[in-house]
Image (tube, rainbow, N blue to C red):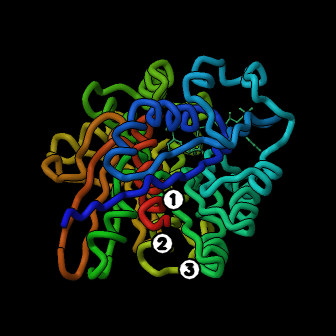
Amino acid sequence: MNLIIEIKLKTLKIAIVGFGVIGRGFVSVLKAKHGFIKKNFDVDLKISAICEVNGSIVDEKGINPDSVLKLDSKRLDRHNNWTSMKSPDIIERIDSGVILEVTPGNIKTGEPGLSHIKTALKNGRHVVTSNKAPIALKFSELKNLAERKNLKLMFEATVGGAIPLINLCRETLHINKIESIHGILNGTSNYVLTKMFEEGVNINSALKEAQELGIAESDPSYDINGIDTGVKIVILANSLMNRNVSFRDVKIKGITDITPEAVDIAKKHNYVIKLIGDAGKLEVSPRLIPVNNPLNVSGPLNAIMLHTDIAKNITVIGHGAGAEETASSLFSDVLYIAKDLH
Ligand SMILES: NC(=O)c1ccc[n+]([C@@H]2O[C@H](COP(=O)([O-])OP(=O)(O)OC[C@H]3O[C@@H](n4cnc5c(N)ncnc54)[C@H](OP(=O)(O)O)[C@@H]3O)[C@@H](O)[C@H]2O)c1
């Protein structure tokens, strides 16, 4: 007797909220990997909506990636399926299994992402986000809401860009107790400190070069003052170390006072100065790191060292930002959700 096993292709509809660097990166990776995902994960990922500030593109049958990638990010209104519906309505009313929340987050209010995530969960949609602010500010509230609704709230891309840190702890190191997490979580400040170490320049000229290369933003103050790292360690402490802390609990000192002379003295003693975020001690500060330590990564790379009770020390290194790099983490979250679809 021949046994024929039919594997039915599942469909997962995704509404993308925010079409900037990351939203566009996600669509571009979907275009490249759609066939691979279908074949290997038995799921057809479709984009049902893309929201921008003024309106959205909507097609519940699936938006063709090429049709949006060819448009300027600020001219999505030229798309045939453009509507004036804004993100809250899209999240509530348009058929989608996952809301991909990739708007910029206000670190004091968490908005607009916080409202987007709450609306998504209240309306039965899973959430995948790269937006740090709502997760750092309201982790336990959002986690409880997701659990009550039997939904997934996934946020791998909020810390360390492409580095699979949160999922590594959740899926692979799950019998371990995470005893400490510390490392380099901000590419801009690491680029600046690397330049100061390698070329003896001062912070302003290193920063200027980082801006010219598009590594640093036009206003890099959150990066070099340690705020961005502080927000990330709140996420790590709450999600991986069972803490219930807020940004106010973190002691923060950035790299603005680091002089070429200090970098040079460290160098003569075989040390580098790195901006280290420590989720156990809830501290962000410049620290002396031996040159041969795994945390001594250069340029805009991130490096995070975990200490656990069973596996002991593990260090992960990779790209902490970038459109495609960050999309890698977003896809790992989306496909984790797709695995449980019936
Ligand atoms: N870039 C990276 O490498 C990276 C890496 C990891 C995490 N992240 C995080 O990922 C998120 C997105 O980053 P990004 O670099 O893509 O930012 P971005 O380029 O500024 O794009 C965000 C987009 O969201 C739009 N937007 C703002 N408010 C909105 C609303 N209420 N409804 C719909 N769309 C809205 C913005 O439109 P307007 O420009 O018109 O305001 C913009 O087009 C941020 O939270 C960021 O911190 C970024």
Q: What secondary structure is found at the residue carrying circle 3?
A: loop
Q: Residue 157 at what x, y percent from top left?
A: 47, 51
Quarter for ligand 1? top right
Q: Which residue is mark 3?
A: 244
Per the model, the C-alpha gap separating discs 3 and 2 is 9 Å
Which amino acid type is shown beneath numbered disc 3?
Answer: Asn
Per the model, the C-alpha gap separating discs 3 and 1 is 17 Å
Q: Residue 137 at what x, y percent from top left?
A: 65, 66
* Residue 103 in sight: no
* 2 vs 1, front mark: 1
Q: Which mark is residue 239?
A: 2
Circle nearer the N terminus (2, 1): 1
Q: Which residue is mark 1?
A: 155
The answer to whether 120 appears left or right of 9 in the picture is: right
Circle nearer the N terminus (3, 2): 2
In the depicted structure, whether residue 32 falls above or below residue 269 = above
Crowding at dot 2, Cα within 10 Å, few <14 / some 14-19 / many 20+, comes out as many
Circle nearer the N terminus (3, 1): 1
Q: What secondary structure is found at the residue carrying circle 1?
A: loop
The answer to whether 335 appears left or right of 71 in the picture is: left
**Residue farthest to the right, as pictured:** 84
Q: Considering depth in this image, is 36 or 210 the residue closer to the camera?
A: 36
Q: Residue 294 at what x, y percent from top left?
A: 19, 52
Crowding at dot 3, Cα within 10 Å, few <14 / some 14-19 / many 20+, comes out as few
Q: How many marks?
A: 3
**Residue farthest to the front, as pictured:** 1
Per the model, the C-alpha gap separating discs 2 and 1 is 10 Å
Which amino acid type is shown beneath numbered disc 2?
Answer: Ser
Residue at 31 percent of width and 49 percent of height: 40
Query: Can you tell which quarter of the image residue 175 is in?
Result: bottom left
Which amino acid type is shown beneath numbered disc 1?
Answer: Phe
Q: What secondary structure is found at the residue carrying circle 2?
A: helix
